[in-house]
Amino acid sequence: MDKFRMMFQFLQSNQESFMNGICGIMALASAQMYSAFEFSCPCMPEYNYNYGIGLLIVPPIWFFLLGFVLNNNVSVLAEEWKRPTGRRRKDPTILRYMFCSITQRSLIAPAVWVSVTLMDGKSFLCAFSIDLDIERFTDGNFTKGMSEVEKMKILARIPCKDLFHHQEVRVAASRYIKCISQACGWLFLLMMTFAAFLIRAIRPCFTQAAFLKTKYWSHYIDIERKMFDETCKEHAKSFAKVCIHQYFEGISGEMRNFHENHSKKYDANEEDEDKKMSDEEKLMGIRAQDDMNKALWNWHTCKPALALRKEQMNGEHNGLLNGETNGCANGHTHDVQRKEWAVYYSKV
């Protein structure tokens, strides 16, 4: 279990590598699913085209949506897009960068499915067998005297070798359509590869500073969200621990002595962590439910500006609970005397 936990923590800390691994697994899964899929063309004129084209289009759409579902940055993108502006402006370029990054990874598995399907040619043969000129593979008397309805029924049976009695004609027609399908598959791969090459080659030609800024702040949004969740989890743990201790201490004074004796039996790792920061310090002055709800509400409605000033950090932290820094959340602002500073304000 320790090894799996270490691996999971590594993947969480390396979000890009984790998502690339997910995309690779989905691509392999799409190819494996197609190989394990039992292709059964209905061999009926009114259903062949819908079945063949549906097999070529519907699974890629499902893989594309699944790529969005498995990508953790989708929730980050949605939260950043819908959050109130507050004291931190939103930059559309960062949202576009995150959306394009998610879309590019989600397109890998659908591209693999379409490529494998076209290379195999079964769905293409099922969809377009009724449009084939069968006279090119016969002596010209094969469909002589047949009506259009009977001719379409015969052509629809080409993908089904058990229903088509003239095997030589069926094999020749199948090879012809499969060759066209494989040509479309190679053309699709060429177009996808060329598009990926253009994206990677043209991007450095634009302003690299703007790209670096966009990439930096997109990573910042993801990391800030993770650290905020970790801080809330740590605060909730300390809050619950202190609350439980106070509850038992209020019932009986003996529980306090028991706790002091029992606390000596903690592991060395927990003792080191307690030395670094006690539970009281982890509460960071927030010791009431209303105060915590107010802090969480202000974080959502009025995130702090990305212009850190060292001498004001303590003042802003103390004013978080008494409403001094919650002007945007309450619909008003307070006049505060500030020194003039040359600060870079991000548009995140």
Image (tube, grey):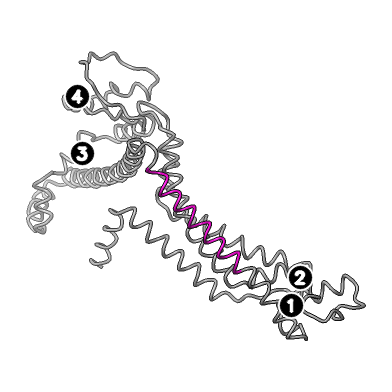
Q: Which residues are magenta?
A: 182-204
Instruction: State left or right for residue 266 relative to residue 299.
Output: left
Q: What secondary structure is marked by label 4?
A: helix
Gap between marks 1 and 3, in whole Å?
Answer: 73 Å
Q: Nearer the viewer, residue 324 or 307?
A: 307
Q: What secondary structure is marked by label 3?
A: loop
Q: Earlier in the sequence, mark 3 or mark 2?
A: 2
Question: Which residue lies at the image location 21% right of the left edge and 47% below the top edge?
Answer: 241
Q: What secondary structure is marked by label 2?
A: loop
Instruction: State left or right for residue 42 relative to residue 286.
Output: right
Say above or below: 260 vs 146. Answer: above
Crowdedness near tag 2: few (<14), some (14–19) or many (≥20) residues, C-alpha within 10 Å = some
Gap between marks 1 and 4, in whole Å?
Answer: 78 Å
Instruction: State left or right for residue 147 relative to residue 224.
Output: right
Q: Earlier in the sequence, mark 1 or mark 4?
A: 1
Q: Position of residue 7 (x, y in %)?
A: 27, 63
Residue 158 is labelled as 1
Gap between marks 4 and 2, in whole Å?
Answer: 77 Å
Q: Position of residue 86 (x, y in %)?
A: 38, 27
Mark 4 and mark 2 residues within 8 Å of each other at the beta carbon: no
Q: Amino acid at mark 2?
A: Leu
Q: Nearer the viewer, residue 218 or 86?
A: 218
Q: Nearer the viewer, mark 1 or mark 4?
A: 1
Q: Nearer the viewer, mark 2 or mark 1?
A: 2
Q: Position of residue 112 (x, y in %)?
A: 51, 64
Question: Which residue lies at the image location 43% right of the left edge and 34% below the top edge?
Answer: 83
Residue 283 is labelled as 3
- To which quarter of the image does residue 297 belong? top left
* Disc 4: which residue: 312
Crowdedness near tag 1: few (<14), some (14–19) or many (≥20) residues, C-alpha within 10 Å = many
